[in-house]
Image (cartoon, rainbow, N blue to C red):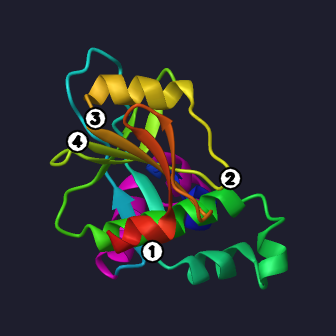
Amino acid sequence: MLAHYHGQLWNGNEIAASMGVSPTTARHYLDALEQTYMIRRLLPWHANVGKRLVKTPKIYFRDSGIFHSLQGIASHAEMVVHPKLGASWEGFALEQILRSRRDEDAYFYAIHSGSELDLYFPSSATGVEIKYQDAPRLTRSMRISMNDLKLRELLVIYPGDREYELADGIRALPLAKMCSV
């Protein structure tokens, strides 16, 4: 059931109802999976930015192999045509980034009007957006997040091999380069 929520907001009531258990029991199951390092619960950033913030955590499988198995993805060929390809890449990249920056607290940022950031590191005022694209482009959401959070830099992590500037303070960066910093 959780594999369908990978990279999405946790909806304990919906999961509990589909499993025929109470929301408290569903939360206890999630706690157990988090404590055994199967699931990462990424908390939202709460700040007074004058906007309606999302306050529900996102969940990710920490091991992309387990996520692929639960989705029935058995090969690379199956993965590249699967509807969860973007979510798979986001979860994999997120886990690699968090491991490389383990001394920093990390959150995601989202407002109900639709703007969001996949990762926010408040101590360094750095935002991270993860995109499974050959050549990511600047979006309105990136500009809004940059302004709302007063970011020093916003990194758009993608599976390519070239680093390039998207706008002032916003640059596309290969995952391999992000994790080697």
Whether 172 is drawn above or below 99: the answer is above
- Name the residue that disc number 4 marks: 125
Q: Amino acid at mark 1?
A: Arg
Q: Amino acid at mark 3?
A: Leu
Q: Residues within 10 Å of mark 3 (few under 14, many from 20)?
A: some
The mark nearer the N terminus, 1 or 2, is 1
Q: CA distance from mark 3 to mark 2?
A: 23 Å
Q: CA distance from mark 3 to mark 1?
A: 27 Å
Q: CA distance from mark 4 to mark 3?
A: 5 Å
The mark nearer the N terminus, 2 or 4, is 4
Residue 88 percent location from the top left of the image: 62, 65
Q: Is residue 19 magenta?
A: yes
- Name the residue that disc number 3 marks: 151
Q: CA distance from mark 4 to mark 1?
A: 24 Å
Span shown in magenta = 13-36
Single out the mark in the foreground, 3 or 1.
3
Tell me which residue sits at (54%, 24%) in the image. 140
Pointers 4 and 3 in contact (C-beta within 8 Å): yes
The mark nearer the N terminus, 4 or 1, is 1
Is residue 151 rendered to the left or right of residue 1?
Answer: left
- Name the residue that disc number 1 marks: 62
Say what secondary structure mark 1 lies in.
loop
